[in-house]
C-alpha cells in the first residue's frame, strides 16, 4: 500500500470523526436549549393558572406543546421513548385540566411536565457525568 493512499484515508477518517463530534455537540446544545425553553413556558403556565389568568396560561401551554411537537422527530431519534410517552400523556392531561378550569391540577401537571421536559434536555447536556 502506498503512503499517499494511507494518508488520504487517515485524513478522511479524522475529518469524519470531527464532523461527527461537531454534529453531536450541536445536537446536544439544541436539545438542551429547546427543552429548557419549553420547561420555562410550562412553569409560567402553572403560575398563570394559579393566578387565574387562564388565557395566558393556555397560550403558554399551547406554545410549549407546539414546540414539543416541532422537535419531537429529532427527540425520537436521540432520546429514550419512555419519558416522551409520559410527556405526551401529561400534555393530554393538561388539556382536560384546562377545559375543567381546575387551576390546582393544571398547575401541578404543568410543574410535573416542566420537570420531565427539563430532565430530558439535561440528559443530553455535555457534562462529565454524561460521559461516564
Image: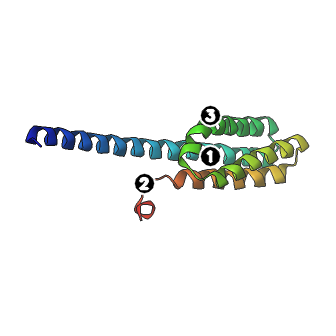
Q: In this figure, which residue is indicated by the disc labeled 2?
A: 126
Residue at 73%, 50% in the rendered image: 110
Question: Alpha-carbon neighbours of circle 3 within 10 Å: few (<14), some, or many (≥20)?
Answer: few
Query: Please, what secondary structure does the residue beneath circle 3 have?
Result: helix
Query: Please, what secondary structure does the residue beneath circle 1 have?
Result: helix
Rendered-image quadrant of the C terminus: bottom left
Q: In which image quadrant can residue 6 be found?
A: top left
Q: Kindly tell me whether residue 51 is visible in this rendering.
A: no
The image shows residue 83 at horizontal and vertical percentages of 65, 54
Q: In which image quadrant can residue 94 be found?
A: top right
- First in residue order: circle 2 vs circle 1: 1
Q: Distance between the residues labelled 2 and 1?
A: 20 Å
Rendered-image quadrant of the N terminus: top left
41 vs 17, left or right, is right
88 vs 74, left or right, is right
Residue at 82%, 44% in the rendered image: 52
Q: Nearer the observer, disc 1 or disc 3?
A: 3
Which label is found at residue 70?
Answer: 3
Q: In this figure, which residue is indicated by the disc labeled 1?
A: 40
- First in residue order: circle 3 vs circle 2: 3
Residue at 83%, 53% in the rendered image: 105
Q: Distance between the residues labelled 3 and 2?
A: 23 Å
Q: Distance between the residues labelled 1 and 3?
A: 17 Å
> In the figure, 51 relative to 131: above or below?
above
Amino acid at each position: 500500500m502506498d503512503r499517499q493512499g494511507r494518508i488520504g484515508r487517515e485524513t478522511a477518517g479524522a475529518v469524519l470523526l470531527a464532523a461527527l463530534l461537531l454534529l453531536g455537540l450541536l445536537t446536544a446544545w439544541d436539545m438542551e436549549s429547546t427543552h429548557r425553553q419549553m420547561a420555562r413556558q410550562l412553569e409560567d403556565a402553572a403560575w398563570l393558572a394559579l393566578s387565574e389568568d387562564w388565557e395566558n396560561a393556555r397560550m403558554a401551554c399551547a406554545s410549549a406543546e407546539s414546540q414539543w411537537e416541532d422537535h419531537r422527530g429529532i427527540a425520537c431519534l436521540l432520546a429514550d421513548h419512555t419519558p416522551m410517552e409520559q410527556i405526551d400523556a401529561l400534555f393530554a392531561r393538561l388539556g382536560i385540566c384546562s377545559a375543567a378550569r381546575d387551576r390546582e391540577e393544571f398547575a401541578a401537571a404543568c410543574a410535573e411536565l416542566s420537570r420531565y421536559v427539563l430532565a430530558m434536555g439535561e440528559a443530553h447536556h455535555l457534562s462529565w457525568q454524561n460521559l461516564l
